[in-house]
Amino acid sequence: MDEVWLAGVDGCPGGWIAAFVRPEGGAVRLRTVNTFAEVIEAPERPAVIAVDIPIGLPERGGRGGRAAENAVRPLLGGRQSSVFAMPSRKAVYAETAWPLTAAELAAAHRRASAVARATSDPPRGVAIQAFCVFAKVRELDALLHADPALARRVFETHPEVAFWRLNGAAALAEPKKVKGRPYGPGLDLRRRLLAAGGLPDAAMAEPPPGAGADDLLDALACALTARRLRAGLAQPFPDPPEHDAFGLPMAIWA
């Protein structure tokens, strides 16, 4: 029996949600963990990890973010806004203490946006949604710098791009959220695509503590991208990938 495990990972309120799968079949293990290092060192020792977090940061930001973001947005139709534009490395690292109050968050966001404008062409600030994932971007970035060999196991993906691939390379007609709340028809559409991709309905029934239903479906979509990566079927956007100043690839795989 093939003992290899793969993982799809998404950020969630409890930290990270990981969906561990085999290269084939319906075995799924779900877990929330506090740190990404716990996914890497999990008992399953996943050979390939596909994660919904940017990998590789530019020295200067460009229009629409990195080439990776610009390459996938046109594929997604009405879901394009789910792909955040990543600014420069300096902007991502401008504020490393997490704000405790709404006022502190607003102030930190303004400071990071000022750094982003100073290090982008044309000058552009940072969306608050992107700013709120910077801590996770830094967490994974630090792990990849500490152990460059991880770049052979850990790949950037994006759930909406993964669902685009599962949907026959067609944009999804329904969002997963409307006005910040889970949207039943959009979640059901994604469940059907995951089932068609070979995952059991039971895996989609209940997210582990600390994760929402949408986080669970996103992690499972990333897990199917990990399968494509393992099989040599996944495509990078852009192709070939760009690389940052530290040699990390900057591409979204699907």
Image (cartoon, rainbow, N blue to C red):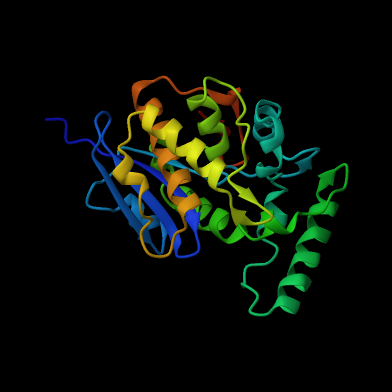
Q: Position of residue 118 (x, y in %)?
A: 85, 53
Figure check: 192 above or below 234: below
Nearer the observer, 12 or 191:
191
Residue drawn at x 34%, y 22% is 231
Q: Quadrant of residue 16?
A: bottom left
Residue drawn at x 31%, y 51% is 30
Residue drawn at x 46%, y 23% is 234
Check the picture and name the quadrant holding the N terminus. top left
Figure check: 211 above or below 187: below
Residue 156 visible from this viewpoint = no
Figure check: 123 above or below 225: below
Q: Position of residue 108 (x, y in %)?
A: 74, 70
Furthest residue toward left:
1
Q: Quadrant of residue 64?
A: top right
Q: How many marks?
A: 0
Q: Position of residue 75 (x, y in %)?
A: 66, 26
Residue 161 visible from this viewpoint = yes
Nearer the observer, 167 or 117:
167
Residue drawn at x 55%, y 28% is 164
Q: Quadrant of residue 85?
A: top right
Furthest residue toward front:
185
Q: Position of residue 34 (x, y in %)?
A: 40, 64
Nearer the observer, 190 or 218:
190
Position of residue 173 in the picture relative to residue 213 (left or right): right
Position of residue 210 in the picture relative to residue 81 (left or right): left
